[in-house]
């Protein structure tokens, strides 16, 4: 089931985020990510996929800057189309906020890179840390 997250989902969303095998959260980014997530909980929407009584994936956009802040699926639920189902909802949030293009970053050589390329995202450059910058028209 796809639905908007409730504040009670936050601990499980954190479990999913920390369970991923790629795109792991570096210790230096924990505070920044937590602050952004707090703002989104107060002002935006986390979309979640609930199955077997728990959140197994989520997508979220940061409507302040037009980015996809996160798209993560618990490793036990990968490959089932959950990311493809959730991502359009986060993109819709950006469109409703007035953005015509969505942006995101991910590490090169990952499943995430292949996923975004296969789903129409365009590689537009690199960040200083080497992450790929992707964009997609909304």
Image (tube, rainbow, N blue to C red):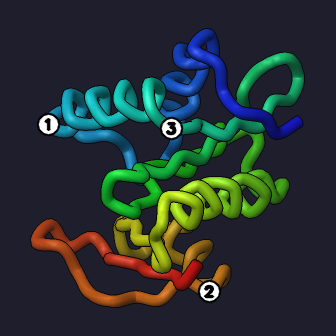
For the image, the number of numbered tags is 3
Asked which quadrant contains residue 36, the reply is top left
Cα separation, mark 3 vs mark 1, equals 24 Å
User: If you read the primary sequence from the N terminus, does the residue marked by circle 3 or circle 1 appear first?
Assistant: 1
- Mark 1 burial class by Cα count in 10 Å: few <14, some 14-19, many 20+: few
**What residue is shown at x 78% (from left), y 57% (from top)?**
85
Check disc 3 and report the residue beneath it: 44
Counting from the top left corner in percent of width and height, residue 72 is at: 57, 46
Circles 3 and 1, Cβ within 8 Å, touching? The answer is no
Check disc 2 and report the residue beneath it: 120
Front residue (pair 66, 33): 66
Quadrant of image for the C terminus: bottom right
Cα separation, mark 1 vs mark 2, equals 31 Å
- Mark 3 burial class by Cα count in 10 Å: few <14, some 14-19, many 20+: some
Check disc 1 and report the residue beneath it: 28
Nearest-to-viewer mark from 2 and 3: 3
Nearest-to-viewer mark from 3 and 1: 3
Circles 1 and 2, Cβ within 8 Å, touching? The answer is no
Counting from the top left corner in percent of width and height, residue 109 is at: 42, 75
User: If you read the primary sequence from the N terminus, does the residue marked by circle 1 or circle 2 appear first?
Assistant: 1
**What residue is shown at x 36% (from left), y 67% (from top)?**
105
Asked which quadrant contains residue 13, the reply is top right
Q: Is residue 136 above or below residue 30?
A: below
In the rendered structure, find residue 39 and report the number of the disc placed on it: none
Q: Residue furthest top?
A: 8
User: If you read the primary sequence from the N terminus, does the residue marked by circle 2 or circle 3 appear first?
Assistant: 3
Query: Is 11 on the left-hand or right-hand side of 128?
Result: right
Nearest-to-viewer mark from 1 and 2: 2
Asked which quadrant contains residue 96, the reply is bottom right
**What residue is shown at x 47% (from left), y 27% (from top)?**
41
- Mark 2 burial class by Cα count in 10 Å: few <14, some 14-19, many 20+: few
């Amino acid at each position: 089931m796809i639905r908007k997250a409730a504040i009670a989902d936050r601990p499980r969303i954190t479990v999913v985020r920390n369970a991923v095998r790629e795109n792991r959260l570096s210790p230096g980014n924990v505070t920044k990510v937590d602050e952004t997530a707090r703002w989104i909980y107060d002002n935006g929407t986390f979309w979640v996929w609930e199955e077997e009584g728990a959140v197994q994936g989520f997508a979220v956009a940061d409507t302040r800057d037009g980015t996809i802040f996160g798209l993560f699926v618990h490793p036990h639920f990968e490959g089932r189309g959950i990311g493809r189902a959730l991502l359009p909802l986060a993109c819709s949030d950006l469109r409703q906020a007035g953005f015509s293009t969505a942006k995101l970053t991910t590490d090169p050589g990952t499943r995430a890179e292949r996923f975004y390329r296969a789903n129409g995202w365009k590689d537009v450059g690199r960040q200083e840390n080497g992450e790929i910058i992707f964009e997609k028209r909304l």
